[in-house]
Image: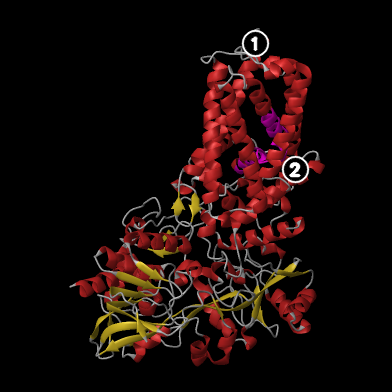
Amino acid sequence: MSESGVHYDVVVIGGGNAGLAAALTARRAGARVLVLERAPRELRGGNSRHTRNLRCAHAAPTDILTDAYPDEELLADLERVNEGETDELLAALVAARSAQCVSWMAAFGARFQTALRGTLQLARTNAFFLGGGTALMNSYYAAAAKLGIDVRYDAEVVELVLRDGRFESVTLQSNRAPFAVRANAAVVAAGGFEANLDWLRDAWGDAASNFLIRGTPYNTGTMLRALLDAGAAPIGDPRECHAVAIDGRAPKFDGGIVTRLDCVPLGIVVDRNGERFYDEGEDVWPKRYAIWGKLVANRPGQIAYAIFDAKVRRLFMPSAYPAIEASSIRGLAAQLQLPVEPLEATVAAFNGAVQPGSFDHTALDDCRTAGLSPEKTHWAQQLDTPPYAAYPLRPGITFTYLSVRVDSEARVLATNGVPFENVYAAGEIMAGNVLRKGYIAGIGMTIGTVFGRIAGESAARHATK
Amino acid sequence: MQLNELTREGARVMTVCNACRYCEQYCPAFQAMEQRVTFASADLNYLANLCHACGECLYACQYAPPHELAINVPKTFAQLRVQSYEQYAWPAALGAAFRRQGVMTALLLAGVMIALLLGTALALNRDALLETGTAADFYAVIPHGVMVALFGGIGLFVLVALAVGAARCVRDQRTMNATAAHGERGGTPAALRDALTLKHLHVAGRDCTTGLEVRTPWRRWLHHATFYGFTLCFVSTCVATLYHFAGTPAPYAYSSAPVLLGTAGGIALFIGTAGALLHRSARDAALSDAAQDNLDRSFLVLLLLTAATGLLLLALRHERAMGLLLVVHLGVVLALFVTLPYGKLVHGLYRAIALLRYRREPDRARAKEAP
């Protein structure tokens, strides 16, 4: 095995938001920095390239954030989705430091949307990147180039070489023989294992073969596994992943935002036997979309169909794929290759159970069914206005929760609780410290930015002393 | 790409974009897109003509090639724009000219025009053409009546062709899928300001892109120089026409309004077009389309030659070469005139109409937007 000639202060494994935040911070602190990005340049940025915003506390309205969002409230939101199971200290750190994210990012060229347009319901709590996460990554990479950070694309790290809890080098895959890059400190910001279907099968069995991965195909968890094998303490449920129901026609990987479907509460959802299986109108969609991935994953063939009629057609964001249409339920069954009689029976039973009410898709209305199993408790309207339309649904995996434990300096902790001397982690690979279950919009980017900066600072301090 | 295939591709691209909307604060094209659920040919024409090809949305796109969804909005819109020019052209048979021109055809046409004028001048005023003295008397070379008949006639045709194109564009907009109420009024001053300041070329307060993370003001300033230079030249001609009929025939002194306006305009036009030709060869090729590129270049070359020969003619109007230079200049201007309704000029017309429509489409958020 050969060695690259240059010896860096800090090597950053992973070129997404957390990795770049770490690299920029370390470089600013005077370190010689190398970023290893596994993707080619065109697809750089990990899952950050699919993101759109970041959650941040602020005391008063700004041009990009409305009203105020105290960090205590952000912390309370975090504790609520975690049902109390978060690392209090680290969660408080994320909430407190979130307030500085926007100005820090802007200093590296990030631009944000103004809070002007009404389509942004999250304008109080979340700052939206102008053009989205890919534009943010472009700004970061341009800033990195300007500051003299070395970036290597198509750089797959196959081994993390540690000796007695001390990082020595990384081994990179290349066309020829693998070679080593040495550095005084490593920041591991290489994401979770959601794109590793074999690993997902360990947790989900063969059903995982039918999962779609919403983000980058490069998050295969190689670095997560390497750290765990080296004795890092795991945190977060190793079987858990954030799964939403997305358009079943989406690409296997990297489908991102355009595969999402918001139409579930407006109609009914049936499995491939033509049967309903869950209350589509249990709550407003932002509070329920994250359970539907697992609901669909548990159905035969990991597929379901959201069916609605012409009445609600314009009430939700369109998907990137056209709805499948027919003038009758029978015709729709044929198009979807669903058994005709069961589907007709399901729709007839549903229509018969719909109670009178005043429909309002913007609120928890009083339109419900009575006598069905399962009931639909809101927005239940008869399916009676052709054309009928449907979207196929499949589980779309956004991220995995299994992480390595870190301390407040972003140092990776060994199973005995002692930190590794010079190994730091940031982003999804350590997000499980703060986010054990559920999700709140934009928190992944907040964790990545806050801990990326902490990791970069800690690593530079260690590497250059 | 075939007409229908391109329309289908445009609808596919817009459907993906409409499900994403990350680019919504870049420019009006995306805001207008959000008013629609499906995209018919007319909607695509409108959206494409709203686009100023600033390029931001390609670099920001998570679905840009090599992603399998292969979304490239600037390129798709550039292709759709050429298609819309062709669709609106009058007479329709000449619409094909939009796809069949480039620098070579422009030069060829200029050559033909020069030859025709040369023949005319030789036949009418052989001596004046070759033996011009210091009087700078253009009309001795090409008589005033001939010039008026030629340029007046072609000018009239150009105006009719552009007017029909504009009418077809407006009629096309009426078949759009958007819910905008017909017969909306107002917004004209705002739309005019949007067009004249190229407001949407420097999106969100930053200059438009030349490449990934490369933003320069050049494209905007060169466009301003070209457009306002052209306008000054046009005004100069109009003023000279007034002078003529007021009983003060050419030549005019260097300090006269027509010469001052024409000189300022000519210099601006020269700088604008020469700069634009240089700048666009430095621009990321992924942002454009071959047909659109050819249109740009042929128009720029004719404008550049018009400015260059005009300035040269002014400088040498007391020299022997004046006669030949005049013929060359007028030949180039004739070629430019003839191609106006079938070249890049129409982008300004259809963009202005699109910007007006944009100002008239209902959008609650836009009401809050700064004027």
Q: Which residue is mark 1?
A: B249
**Residue B368 visible:** no
Q: Is label 2 on the same chain as label 1?
A: yes
Residue drawn at the location 55% of the way across and 32% of the way down: B269
- Where residue A81 sits in the image (x, y, percent)? 40, 75
Pointer 1 local density, CA inside 10 Å: few below 14, some 14–19, many at least 20: some
**Residue A34 visible:** yes
Residue drawn at the location 47% of the way across and 73% of the way down: A39
Residue drawn at the location 38% of the way across and 54% of the way down: A67
Position of the C terminus of chain A, as image quadrant, is bottom left
Pointer 2 local density, CA inside 10 Å: few below 14, some 14–19, many at least 20: many
Instruction: Give the residue type that dot 1 points to.
Output: Pro
Position of the N terminus of chain A, as image quadrant, is bottom left
Residue at the far top in the pictured view: B247
- Where residue B58 sits in the image (x, y, percent)? 54, 58
Q: Say which of A65 and B142 sits in front.
A: B142
Mark seen at residue B282: none
Of the two numbered discs 2 and 1 on the same chain, state the one appearing first in sequence.
2
Give the mark toward the camera: 2 or 1.
Answer: 1
SS type, badge 2: helix
Q: Which residue is mark 2?
A: B88
Which quarter of the picture shows residue A452?
A: bottom left
SS type, badge 1: loop
Instruction: Give the residue type that dot 2 points to.
Output: Tyr
Taking the magenta stretch, the answer to whether it contains residue A63 is no
- Which residues are drawn in magenta? B331-358
> What colouring method underlies this structural image?
secondary structure
Q: Say which of B108 and B155 sits in front.
A: B108
Q: Say if A30 sits above or below A295 in the image.
A: above
